[in-house]
Image: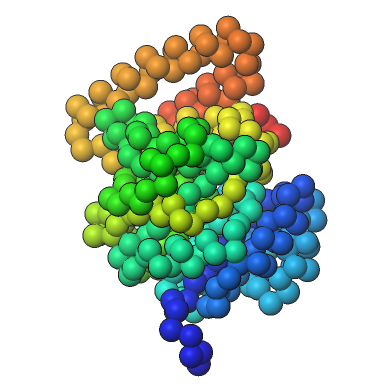
Amino acid sequence: MTDDPSPAVAVIVVNYNSASFIDAFCASLADVEYGRLRLIVVDAASSDGSMDAIERAFPGATHVRCDENVGFAAGANIGVRLALAAGDDFALFLNNDVTLTPGFLRALVAAADPRTAVVPKILYAADPRLISTHAGGFDWRLGVFRDTFAGRADSAATSRRRDGIATASFCCALVPLAAFRESGLLDERFFMYYEETDFIRRAQAHGFRLRYEPSAVIYHRESGSSGGGWMTPFKQYYATRNRLYLVRKHATSRQALAYFTAYFWVTRVASAASMAGRGRWRLLRAMTLGMLDYYRGRMGRTREVRDL
């Protein structure tokens, strides 16, 4: 029995072929200043030795090696089940392509409560003057993020706490485990991308809140395990497919779904023309496959980085 009254935090990391940046992640995690923290790493069948590096860095952590690439949603659910069984208070989801500041977790915990999830300020590792996060609003009519500051310069506006936001990335998110008991686990049909927006929507329906806390700061490489950069063919494919699924799942009426579908197709035609004009054929192919697979009912893990 510990004398530390701080909430118990299970840090959940889903790892996949991260050898090029995992040492930086491990070094920053080792420097985090928080007592009641334990690490759960779920490896999605990496082939580059990155899980070996994590096990060397954190031999006392819980290590789960999967036989296949289970994706973020299923991998995170494995960690959540372990954290629930252990009686932890919060799950801290972390991408393995981030680097952390020592005090970020203390700031997140201080801003959280049993009904409030908290996300930090996430800056681009390559240019820390810019925000790399989509914490903010979500327009369910059109299936687009609103007022998130993503890609904009860090400023006074991005340094103010924001309450009642609609969604945020699970690149880094401190979530009360009670939210999973009441709202269910992540929907594994997403595989990755938009699963957190779906979960947050369900959790908010059960009375949970979401807060942006800028005093907690981390740095993000962006799409480190899916090819690197803001938009990759892998991300384009899953974001396209899953956006269609997300809005259909939460549509309040047939009319609302029809309105979104019309908007989606008009804007995809424009995007396709733009990609073709710039010779971005891989992105165009990935977007097309994402739409085709959605309408074929192909959800979950359907494409790998190498396929796109």
In the picture, measured across the screen, residue 147 lies left or right of residue 40, that is left
Of 156 and 270, nearer the camera is 156
Quarter residue 248 falls in: top left
Q: Residue at x 71, y 62 (%)?
A: 27
Of 67 and 207, nearer the camera is 207
What percent of the width, then of the height, locates residue 59?
73, 74
In the picture, measured across the screen, residue 167 lies left or right of residue 292, that is left
The residue at the far top in this view is 277
The image shows residue 307, relative to residue 55, as above or below, that is above
What percent of the width, then of the height, locates residue 107?
46, 64
The image shows residue 245, relative to residue 268, as above or below, that is below
In the picture, measured across the screen, residue 308 lies left or right of residue 295, that is right
Q: Residue at x 48, y 32 (%)?
A: 152
The image shows residue 4, relative to residue 265, as above or below, that is below
Of 78 and 168, nearer the camera is 168
Total number of numbered discs in the rendering:
0
Quarter residue 65 falls in: bottom right
The residue at the far front in this view is 156
Quarter residue 113 falls in: bottom left
In the picture, measured across the screen, residue 158 lies left or right of residue 1, that is left
The image shows residue 55, relative to residue 287, as above or below, that is below
For the rendered model, the colour scheme is: rainbow
What percent of the width, then of the height, locates residue 12?
55, 63
Q: Residue at x 75, y 56 (%)?
A: 23
Q: Which quarter of the rendering shows the C terminus?
A: top right
In the rendered image, is residue 131 in sight? yes
What percent of the width, then of the height, locates residue 288?
53, 21
Q: Residue at x 41, y 62 (%)?
A: 175
In the rendered image, is residue 44 in sight? no
